[in-house]
Image (cartoon, rainbow, N blue to C red):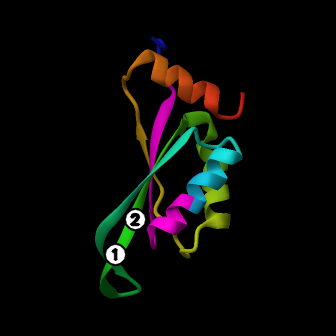
Amino acid sequence: MTATPTAVIVLVTTPNADAAASIARTLVEEGLAACGNVIPGVRSIYRWEGKVHDEAEALLVLKTERRLVPELKLRLQEIHPYQVPELLVLPVDDGLGPYLDWVAASVRPA
């Protein structure tokens, strides 16, 4: 198993599953993420520009390496349809060694 996981989970909401899939494909093809899971049917209730909104969205769950997060943030802002996209980075404290090794091998080399 990888001694110290450097993998992170990145959460991104999108207007729909097609947008999430397009973003995931771009980030995986560019080596900024190893994998993207599209979870349709998310209901988001949030405040934006002084109003409370209640809308259907899709959640994109990305797996990548912490070292790629700065570049992923920049790229996401270029390709995401929202003015201010959600991007939350969660640390991976532990996991199955071969899976963590796969994440590391599936993104751009350091």
Q: Is residue 6 left or right of residue 94?
A: right
Spatial CA span between label 2 and label 1: 7 Å
Percent across and percent down for residue 81 are 57, 74
Local SS, label 1: strand
2 over 95 or under it: above or below: above
At horizontal 59% and vertical 59% (from top left) the residue drawn is 23
Kindly identify which residue carries mark 1.
56
At horizontal 31% and vertical 67% (from top left) the residue drawn is 41
Q: Is residue 73 left or right of residue 45?
A: right
Circles 2 and 1 in contact, beta carbons < 8 Å? no
85 over 74 or under it: above or below: below
Q: Is residue 85 visible?
A: no
Kindly identify which residue carries mark 2.
58
User: Is residue 90 magenta-colored?
Assistant: no
User: Is residue 14 magenta-colored?
Assistant: yes
Percent across and percent down for residue 15 are 45, 73
Q: Is residue 50 left or right of residue 60?
A: left
At horizontal 56% and vertical 34% (from top left) the residue drawn is 65
